[in-house]
Amino acid sequence: MALPDVKQTATDARLAALTLPEGGCLEPARRAALSRVQTLGLPGRRDEYWKYTRPETLTSAEVTPAAVFDAGEPPMFDEFDSLKVVFVDGVFDAEASDDLSLEGVQIDRIADICGKDIHWAKDLCGVLEARGQSPVARPLAALNTAFAQDGLAIHVTGTPSKPINMVYRHTETGSDAILHHVVLVDAGAEATILENGPAAARFNKCMEIDIADTGKLHLVRSQGRDHERRAATHLFARLGTESQFKAFTLTVNGVLTRNEAVIELTGDDAIAHIAGACAGDGDFHHDDTVFITHDAVNCESRQVFKKVLRNGATGVFQGKILVKEGAQKTDGYQISQSLLLDDDSQFLAKPELEIYADDVACSHGSTSGAIDEDALFYLRSRGVPEGDATDLLTLAFLAEAVDEIEDDTIAEAIVARLEGWLSRRR
């Protein structure tokens, strides 16, 4: 079926502004992804899963400039002992990065793999992204697979002694970054990946994660404080038997952020938790779109998303739990909540359950409301200033999402960053 004229024109314009990398073992995946983009077309407002978020600035051939924000605050996770990998406007910075050698893990650049005929990433790159195109099309992810020229291939073979910390720096007002990461976790292996920074004026990032039986991966992201940045991120994960995947994302600032996650539990007794906390002020639009598929027995999934919005900010949550036939004893939990600090902000939610098994425990809920006046009065009556009292209640509201982070030290760093955001905006 031919694309509508408007979508065809927008897709052609975007593709004409990009150059498809050629050669190497990833070229077949790139060309297959390009074909998906051409068939699907880039997203428009008429697409069901884009009706709450305007995609034009994410899909246009031209980049909307974004001022570089620097308040002198050190990047998140700088205080942790980690293997630091730095990308500046989407390009690997070897001088700012640590040596990529670390026991229990093999790390290669996607840019280097492009010149090789054989690499393990060939069997993963584009595979989970392609699987994630059904039943909901995700053409921006396919665009990423086709055109990303940098990123990391991370093969976790054991238990690294420290986290892998990917730092994304934004230095050019018109930068347009596309990064693609692939992560393979072997059976019994376990690792933590940290990501932080605004990356670029416009950022398109895709991460494909394949976790073998009994493997574990922890992912914690902080998306940077640049006020004018725009970002579309895509997370695809496949879990084997008794494996675990836990992810948390913190977002403050940014004009537009769209975080998509597609997770498949394909092995029995697998566990997937995905959570997010965002705090938005003014011209801020934040969209979490999550699709979790249970396709095995006795699996557990949790979706916990909290948004604090004020001065006209907008939050979106679209979350689905699909339980396939035979996926008995599924435990699926989904909660999305917003705290509106004024009458001008809004929260748009679309929670979904689709269940084809009869022995399950699945629930979803979505609420939106203001600060509890009774709790606020209680704190103020005991001498707590109104600003401090509001901040305390806001942090308490976000706590359920932050609690999904297993490492207490990392969770404390996230809370400290939220406290700083709140105190600056009184």
Image (cartoon, rainbow, N blue to C red):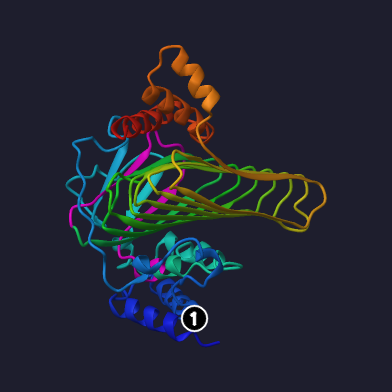
State yes or no: residue 179 in magenta: no
Residue 68 shown left or right of residue 141 in the figure: left
Image quarter in which the N terminus is found: bottom right
Residue 323 shown left or right of residue 103 in the figure: right
Q: Is residue 156 visible?
A: yes
Horizontal and vertical percent position of residue 231: 36, 57
Provide the residue span drawn in magenta. Answer: 144-172
**Hey, what amino acid is under mark 1?**
Thr
Horizontal and vertical percent position of residue 217: 50, 42
Name the residue rendered at 38%, 37% in the picture: 163
State yes or no: residue 163 in magenta: yes
Horizontal and vertical percent position of residue 249: 44, 43
What residue does disc 1 label? 39
Horizontal and vertical percent position of residue 330: 73, 46
- Quarter of the image holding residue 262? bottom right
| Label 1 neighbour load within 10 Å: few <14, some 14-19, many 20+ | some
Instruction: Point out the residue furthest to the top here.
Output: 382
Name the residue rendered at 41%, 27% in the picture: 391
Name the residue rendered at 43%, 67% in the picture: 140
Q: Is residue 178 above or below residue 390?
A: below
